[in-house]
Amino acid sequence: MTVWDVLSVFGTLVGFILLLVLAWWASRAIGRAYAGSGAGRAVQVLDRVALGGEKQLLVVRAAGKVLFLGVTAHQISFLQELDEAQLPPPAEGPESGPFLAAFRRALDAKEGRETGDEQDGPAQSG
């Protein structure tokens, strides 16, 4: 193997690495540009129920109104306007609830930390 062969392989490897870095950078730049496009400020999905296939029912808040919509792959149908006062309170999200509290206690016990009323933050040693 000659010096030129080694340099050729090395150059190819460097070029490939540069291509990967460029692709990573481009995907991050494009992701930041479109990050807000999925969730609008004026429209909020309050609840969603899948009916099978590509069919679902949505409860949506838009323009100060709560709407009940039927959604398929090809169509969105207005079903009814709902009274917001009659909606049930929002369910506990993944950031709270009894399961998360029990999981944190078990994790703390496994890691040897004292369990208490603290929700966040590492145990401090002094």
Image (spheres, grey):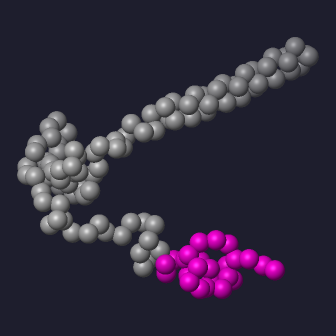
Q: Is residue 97 left or right of residue 67?
A: right
Q: Is residue 123 above or below residue 7?
A: below
- 40 with respect to 3 (left or right): left
Q: Is residue 58 visible?
A: no
Give the prevailing secondary structure in the magenta stretch. loop
Residue 107: x %, y % from top left? 59, 77
Q: Residue at x 12, y 60 (%)?
A: 83
The residue positioned 67% from the left and 72% from the top of the image is 122
Rendered view: 40 above or below 59? above
Farthest residue to the right: give it: 3
- State left or right for residue 91 relative to residue 65: right
Q: Which residues are magenta?
A: 101-126
Is 114 part of what is drawn in magenta? yes
Please provide percent x and percent y for residue 96. Answer: 44, 71
| Quadrant housing the C terminus | bottom right
Q: Is residue 12 left or right of residue 29?
A: right
